[in-house]
Amino acid sequence: MSGAENHSPGIQDYGQNTVASSLHLMLRFLRTVRMRSGILVATLVISCIAGAAYFITAQRIYQSNASLYIVRKGGNVTDETQNSGGSPNNDMPTFIELMSRDKVIEGALKRLPKNARVDLVGNAAGQWVKIIKDNLSVSSAFSTTVMDLSFRSKDPKAAAAVLRAMLAAYEDYLDATHNGSSEESIRKLKEQLAD
């Protein structure tokens, strides 16, 4: 039992076999690439032409972004949050929901100049609110009182104009809501005093 029959492969032999095998596979791959180089070049050229054609003909979509910082006003704002354990950002989901309300969007559409209605052309007036809502994104980062808005449009100036109109309509909506409830409270108090 001497010679090759007694020899068991060691770690070095196994490592050499793996390196040789990997080198053989690499050379085989390179030989296949060289033999099929015409097909590879043709595929690459066709892919580049298709990509360039898509880039040239694709509809451009622009996005405009805005941020709105929400601040509480009124008496005892800090006392209220300290005593109740709440924070000002607890109301952010409500503010986000209000921004995408139909009434706010309708107010923005009334303010929107004719030249900024690029995305609405060719659609019925009844669908405009849905179109604005579909292209509008309203969010807030966790634990902040900053509302982030973005609007996608075919025209960059139209996207910015829609966001300006949305912010103005949102402010009007909140003012009308708060002033309306304040005026109603004053009217009730006057009625009670008169009785």
Image (cartoon, rainbow, N blue to C red):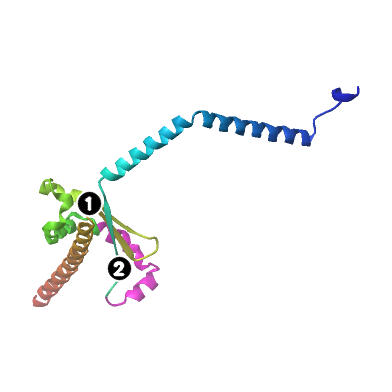
Residue 127 picture location, percent across and down: 15, 47
**In what element is the residue under mark 2?**
loop
Residue at screen point 26% across, 43% down:
57
The residue at the far right in this view is: 1
Residue farthest left in this picture: 194
In which image quadrant can residue 115 be found?
A: bottom left
Q: Where is residue 74 shown, x and y percent of the image?
A: 27, 76
Classify 160 as above or below 81: above
Q: Quadrant of residue 91?
A: bottom left
Specify start and end residues of the magenta stretch as a single range: 74-97
Q: Is residue 29 above or below residue 62?
A: above
- Look at the numbered discs 1 and 2 and tell me whether their residues touch, using CB distance below 8 Å: no
Answer with the quarter of the image where residue 98 lies: bottom left
Res 70 label: 2
Real-space CA distance between mark 1 and mark 2, rounded to the nearest whole angstrom: 29 Å
As shown in the figure, which amino acid type bears the numbered disc 2? Ile
Q: Which residue is mark 1?
A: 154
Closest to the camera, between mark 1 and mark 2, is 1
- The residue under the point 23% across, 60% down is 160
At a point 39% along the width and 73% down the height, the residue shown is 82
Q: Nearer the viewer, residue 115 or 167?
A: 115
Q: Earlier in the sequence, mark 1 or mark 2?
A: 2
172 w.r.t. 16: above or below: below
Q: Pinpoint residue 13: horizontal percent, then vertical percent.
A: 77, 33
Magenta span main SS = helix
* Kind of residue at badge 1: Lys
Q: In terms of depth relative to the viewer, which is nearer, 108 or 191? A: 108
Q: Which mark is residue 68?
A: none
